[in-house]
Amino acid sequence: MRSTGYHTPQQRLFRATLRAFVALACVFLILPIVLIIPISFSSGSFLSYPLPGLSLRWYRGVMMNPVWMDSIANSLIIAVGATFVATTLGTLAAYGLSSTRFAGRELITALVVAPLIMPIVIFGLGVYFLFARIGLQGTFAGLIIAHAVLGSPFVVLTVMASLQGFDKQLIRASQSLGSTPFTTFRTVTFPIIAPGVFAGALFAFITSFDEIIVALFIASPAQFTLPRQLFTGLRDQIDPSIVAVTTLLVMFTVSLLLFVDFLRRRTARIMRKE
């Protein structure tokens, strides 16, 4: 049914109210983040408005502080390792769940994505007791495994979404020409679903890089990640260097999310062409 473009006064009022509500919700969510960014450039020694002046002293202090730099390095090491594990296992799981039909498929899918809906405190507590028994408590390997479990559902969901529009005739054509399953996946399947795989990998990376609850449970001082160090800094001493680190973390996360959106749009264009 074609729309006439005519809206009643009640419909126009509803649309205006809805837009105003959405705008207020966005302001409520974004304004606190926006307000902390100018403080990171303050020349003062305390968190205050108005700013006494502008300076990069707190950013220089972060770069020269080995505690902050070690925590950044730890976050990158753990996030890269967790992303590699989550992407590899998540892609294989998504491919297996999408390519075959078998009894219990829905149950296995639900178990794979369960970390998305499980309360993170319960997950962290369970990981703490498990890793304490098997010797992974307070190790980089333990944090990488735990973060990989949290990031795998994002990879599974994005790859499965990419595989929904995949033409399986391409696989049959490749196999009819003598290609092995691995060669078919490497040369035919993966290039098509690659944007979905990379998008899932970025979500897994962001999940690991920003995670704090699991780190509170199982990280030793040698594995303090950036969010964990921020928590410690807020508890012990508050100064603008914490705001500078927070600003860097926000900008880094926003950049990754924008890249994820770019990959999502590229995947959508590829699927439309298919």
Image (cartoon, rainbow, N blue to C red):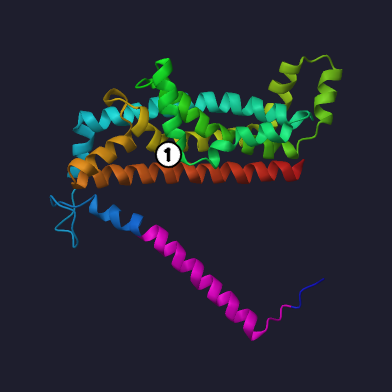
Front position in the image: 270 or 225? 225
Compared across the picture, whether 70 is left or right of 52 comes to: right
Residue at horizontal 72%, vertical 78%? Answer: 5
Query: What stretch of residues is rendered in magenta?
Result: 5-31
Q: Quadrant of residue 14?
A: bottom right
Q: Is residue 257 visible?
A: yes
147 vs 176: above or below: below
Residue 26 location (% of width, % of height):
45, 62
Give the quadrant of the N terminus: bottom right
Q: Quadrant of residue 79?
A: top left
Residue 249 location (% of width, % of height):
35, 42
Q: Is residue 199 visible?
A: no
Residue 168 location (% of width, % of height):
81, 31
Give the quadrant of the C terminus: top right
Q: Residue furthest bottom?
A: 9
Mark 1 lies on residue: 121
| Magenta span contains residue 9 | yes
Residue at horizontal 22%, vertical 37%? Answer: 62
| Magenta span contains residue 191 | no
- Disc 1 secondary structure class: helix
Residue at horizontal 65%, vertical 27%? Answer: 93
61 vs 172: above or below: below
